[in-house]
Image: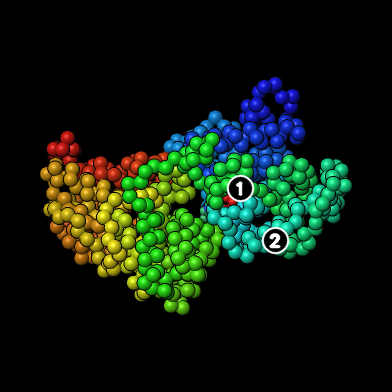
Amino acid sequence: MTSKPNTPLLDQVNLPSDLRLIDDKDLPQFARELRDEMIDAVSVTGGHLGAGLGVVELTIAIHKVFNTPEDRLIFDVGHQCYPHKIITGRRDRIRTLRQEGGLSGFTKRAESEYDPFGAAHSSTSISAGLGMAVAAELGKTERNVIAVIGDGAMSAGMAFEALNNAGALDARLIVILNDNDMSIAPPTGAMSAYLARLASGRTYMGMREIGKKLTAYLGKNIDRAITRAVEHARGYVTGGTMFEEMGFYHIGPIDGHSFDHLLPVLRNVRDNSKGPVLIHVVTQKGKGYAPAEAAADKYHGVNTFDVITGAQAKAKPNAPSYTAVFADALVEEARHDDKIVGITAAMPSGTGLDKLHELFPERTFDVGIAEQHAVTFAAGLASEGYKPFCALYSTFLQRGYDQVVHDVAIQGLPVRFPIDRAGFVGADGPTHAGSFDVGFLASLPGFVVMAAADEAELKHMVRTAAAYDDGPISFRYPRGEGVGVSMPERGEILPIGKGRVMKEGTKVALLSFGTRLAECLLAAEDLDAAGLSTTVADARFAKPLDVDLIRQLARHHEVLVTVEEGAIGGFGAQVLHLLANEGLLDHGLKIRSLALPDAWVDQAKPDVMYQQAGLDAKGIVETVFKALGQKQIGLGVVG
Ligand SMILES: Cc1ncc(C[n+]2csc(CCOP(=O)(O)OP(=O)(O)O)c2C)c(N)n1
C-alpha cells in the first residue's frame, strides 16, 4: 500500500483485506498503532487487557497471511480478541466493549463473520477447529482453519481430547499455541512445566532450524526469507515433542512478537501443510504497556484506568465482596479442622482461595483450567475422609456436571461446592452468567443445595458445609459486594432443610432463595403500604425444601411468589412440584414463580438486568398485583 502521508496506518484499515495491502516492513508501525488503540479503548471500558496486548503481532500476522473470514480463525476463550475486533470492521464500536448494547468482550458468531465460533469458556478452539476442518474436507472446500489457544487453556482435558482426535484424523488444522507462561494466575501443572522446558534456557528456534524443519516436512516451496536467514541462525532442534507424538507437525518455539518469524512460518504452513500442524509461539502477556508488563496478573482483567499511570478506577466498597467473605470464612473453618482442603481451577484470586493458600499452602490445590478433574479430584479426597471445598464459578461448574453426578452424587460423597458468580454477572454477558446451577444440582438425589441471602448467611453456609458430612452440599452467592449486614464472629451451623421467616403477613407470601431477599423485603414494604399484608421468607435451601414452611405459606396466603436469581427449572420448579403433588394448588392459591428469563441475556449492569427480568422490588410488586388481578395506582389498590 502506498500509505497516505501523515495518516495513521490504522485509519487505513477497516478490514483484513485493507491490512493485506500494507507492506510487511510497515507492520511494526501498524502494530504500535493497534496496541495504542486497544489500550485507549480498554482504559474507558475496562475488560481483558493483558491477553490482547500479547497477541497484537500474532493477530496481525494471521489476518495478513490468511484469507479471513473465508479461512476460519478461532480464538480460544476469546478474551484476547480485542485487536482482532479492531481490524475486522468493529473499530468504530470498540469503546462499547462489554457495555449494554455494545460489543461482546469475547468472540461471538452473531457479531461478525470474522468470529466463526463463539467462546468465553476455555479450551474449545481445537475441537471446534477440527470440526470445521473436517467439514471443509467433506465439502471439498479449500480452506485453512486456525485455532489460537493459550498455554493455560491447553491444560484442559478438552484440548487434549481434540489434539488426540486431530492427530488420528490427520485433518488439515493449524493450531497456534500462544505460550505466554501465564493463565490468569501463573499456570500450574506438568503441562506448563513442559512448555516452559521447551521454551526456556534456549533462544527461540532459529531461522535455520525453522527452515530445516519446514523443508523436512513440506519438502518444497520454502519461503526464501527462511533460506536467506540461515546464516544468521542460532537455534536448536526440539526433537520428538509430545505434540509430534500425537500426530502434529510441531514448529517452534518462535518469537510471537517478531513479524520476521511469524510471517514466513505462517505463509509456509498456509501454502504447504497437509495434516495437523502446531506452531508454538512465545509471547509476553501485557506486551508493550509497562504497567501491564509489570503487574503480577499482567492486567488480565482491569477496570477503567488512567493510560499514563496505569492506575485503575476503584469504587469505594460499601461492604466486603461475597468472595472475600467466603475466603475468610473458609480460612476460619480450616483453622478449626485440618481435614478441610480447597480446590480451584485456575482461579485462585477470583474464588478467594489465594487466602487459604497463604495460610495453608499444602491444603490448597490449583488444578489448572480443569473443572472436570477438579470435581473428581475432590471426590477422591472426600472418599478418604477429607473435606474438600471445590470452589468454582457457577458457569464453570457446568463443565464438571457429569463428574458431579457420577463421581460425587451417586456415591454420596461429601464434596462441598462453593458456587461463586451465581446469577447475572454484568459485563461478561451470557457465557458467564451463573444461571443453571440450582436447576442442575437440585435435581440430583441426596444433594443439599443452599443459597446465601446476604454475606452473614454466606458465613453460616460455609460453617454448615464444613460441618455437614453426609453427602454433597453446595452454596451459591453472587458476584460483587454484600449488602452491608453486621457479621458474626464465626458462622453458625444451619439446620439442614430449614428456611426462616423474616416478616409475617396474612395475604401475600414472598419466598426468596438467595440475594433477592433484600428486594423482597422492599417489595413487602410497598405491598403492606398498599394494604396487602405480606410475609417474607428466606428459603435458604432449594434441596431439601423446607416442606413445613412451604405448606404453611401456601395454606395461609392468597398469593405465593417464589423469587430466585437462577434459570427456570430451579428453586421455583422444586416448590411448584411439591405444591402440585401435595394438592396445595387445588384450592385457588395464586402462585407465581420469578426466575431469570428464558433467554440469553446480553451484558449490562446487573441492576439493569435484574430490573429487566422483573426481579427487583418493583417487578415483584407488579407480579403480586397482576396475580390479584389488580392495578396499582400510587400506593393504593384499584380492583
Ligand atoms: C472453562 C473455563 N474455566 C476458567 C475460565 C477463566 N479463564 C479465562 S481466561 C483464563 C486464563 C487463560 O489462560 P491462557 O489460555 O494461557 O490465555 P492468556 O490469558 O494467558 O492469553 C481463565 C482461567 C474460562 N474462561 N473457562
Give the residue pinned by disc 1.
285
Q: Which quadrant of the structure image shows residue 547?
A: bottom left
Q: Quadrant of the N terminus?
A: top right
View extreme (top): residue: 5
The residue closer to the viewer here, 593 or 284, is 284
Residue under the image location 33 percent in, 59 percent down: 458
Q: Kindly tell me whether mark 1's CB lies below 8 Å from ligand 1.
A: yes
The residue closer to the viewer here, 378 or 310, is 310
Residue type of the residue flagged with mark 1: Lys
Q: What secondary structure is found at the residue carrying circle 2?
A: helix
Report the colour scheme. rainbow
Horizontal and vertical percent position of residue 186:
57, 56
Residue under the image location 74 percent in, 24 percent down: 2
Q: How crowded is mark 2: few (under 14 residues within 10 Å), some or many (20 or more)?
A: few
Horizontal side of 49 relative to 22 (left or right) equals: left
Q: Quadrant of the C terminus?
A: top left
Q: Residues within 10 Å of mark 1 (few under 14, many from 20)?
A: many
Residue under the image location 28 percent in, 66 percent down: 492
Give the residue pinned by disc 2.
197
Q: What secondary structure is found at the residue carrying circle 1?
A: loop
Q: In this view, does 19 lie above or below 302?
A: above
Horizontal and vertical percent position of residue 628:
18, 45
Horizontal and vertical percent position of residue 611:
32, 41
